[in-house]
Amino acid sequence: MSLLSAARVMFKDGDVAGAQDVVRSAIELQPQRPVGIAILAMILSESGDLEQAAFQSGRLLALAPDDRQYRNLATSLALRRGRFAEAEQLAEQALRVSPDDQRARCDLVLARHAQGKTTGGLLEYAAHVATLRATPPPDFDTIEQFNTIIAESITEMLADDPGQGAGTLVGGLRLDNAFDLPRPLAHALRHLITDCVGRYLDGREPARKRARYGITAWANVMEAGQYERTHIHESGWISGVYYPKMPDLDRDQDEGRLLFGEHHFGDSVPALPCLSILPDSGQVVLFPSYLYHRTLAFSAQGKRISVAFDIAP
C-alpha cells in the first residue's frame, strides 16, 4: 500500500493527525506531485483547518494552474472562509479555462450573490426551470400507460438487485443506469427525454450552441421518510427529472417537493432564493445543471419513482 493510500485509510478510520503526518511524508518524497498536496488540502478542509487547507490549495494551483478540480477546491475554500471576491475571481478563471464547468458556474453564483452583485440571470428560476408534461413515446397510447410500465420495470429491476443506492440518497434505492431497462423501454425513455429537452431548449440561447449532446440517466425509488441531499450535477449541462410515479401528496404541504436553491455551505455563505415544485406523475422538470436542488421527505404511503438525467455537451 502506498503512503497516500495508507493516509486515506487512516483518515477514514478517524486518525486525522496520523493521516496528515503520512501525507506530509509523501509530499517530502515527491514535492512536485500534486495529488499528495490535494489529499492534504482535503484532509485539512474536512478537519476544519480552512486556512491551512487554503494554503495547500494555493500550492496546488501553482503546480497545476489549469486543473479543474484543484481550482474548484480553491474556490470552495474561499467560499467557506467568506472570501467571496476571491471565490468570484477563481470561478471566473475556471470558466475561462472550462466554459462547461458546472461547479465553477455554481460557485460563481454563490460568490456574486454573497457580495450583493447581480448573477447575470443565472438565478432566474422563471427563465431556467421548466415543468413539462411528457408526451407518450411511440408505441404507447398515453403517458399514463408508459408511466405504469416503466415504474413497474424499475421496481422489478431493483427487487432483483436491492443493494443499489447511495450517493446523495438518504434511504431509497438507485438504478445506476436507467438505460439498462429492457431495450424497448430504454429506447422509449430516451425518446421521451430527447423530446422534452428539445421543447425545453426551443427558443433558449443554448439551443443554438449545442447541436449534439449525450444523455445519462438513472432512476431513484423512495418511500416515506426518504429524501435526497442537496447537490448539483457537475457532469451535465442541462439536467432533468421525469416522474413516472408520485405518491398522493398534499399540495398545501412541503412534503415530497423538489427544492431548488439550498446550498451545502451552511451559514458561511448567504442563503440563495429558493423555488419548490411538487411534480405530478408524467411530468418532467428541466433546469441548468449548476442549480442546487434536493428532494424533501414525505410521510404518505406509496413510492416516489423518478428518472433523473443529464444532458452533457
Image (cartoon, rainbow, N blue to C red):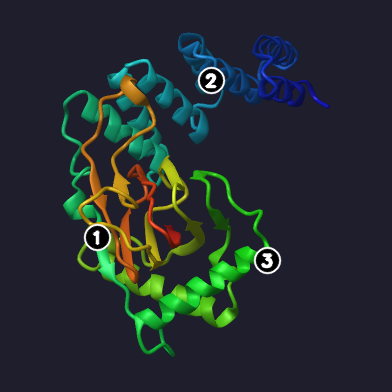
First in sequence, mark 3 or 2: give its number: 2
Query: What residue is drawn where x is 58% and y is 58%?
Result: 176
Residue 89 point in image, percent of width and height: 32, 25
Q: Is residue 47 above or below residue 300?
A: above
Q: Is residue 169 left or right of residue 75?
A: right
Query: What residue is drawn where x is 36% and y is 80%?
Result: 143
Q: Is residue 34 left or right of residue 213?
A: right
Residue type highlighted by circle 3:
Asp
- Residue under pointer 3: 160
Q: Does dot 1 land on a helix, a strand or a loop? A: strand
Local crowd size for mark 1, using a 10 Å CA cut-off: few (<14), some (14–19), many (≥20): some
Query: What residue is drawn where x is 56% and y is 67%?
Result: 155
Local crowd size for mark 3, using a 10 Å CA cut-off: few (<14), some (14–19), many (≥20): few
Residue type highlighted by circle 1:
Ala
Q: Is residue 276 above or below residue 136?
A: above
Local crowd size for mark 2, using a 10 Å CA cut-off: few (<14), some (14–19), many (≥20): few
Q: Does dot 3 land on a helix, a strand or a loop? A: helix
CB under 8 Å between discs 3 and 2: no
First in sequence, mark 2 or 1: give its number: 2
Query: What residue is drawn where x is 37% and y is 62%?
Result: 247
- Residue under pointer 2: 46
Residue type highlighted by circle 2:
Glu
Between 190 and 25, the one lying in front of the other is 190
- Residue under pointer 1: 130
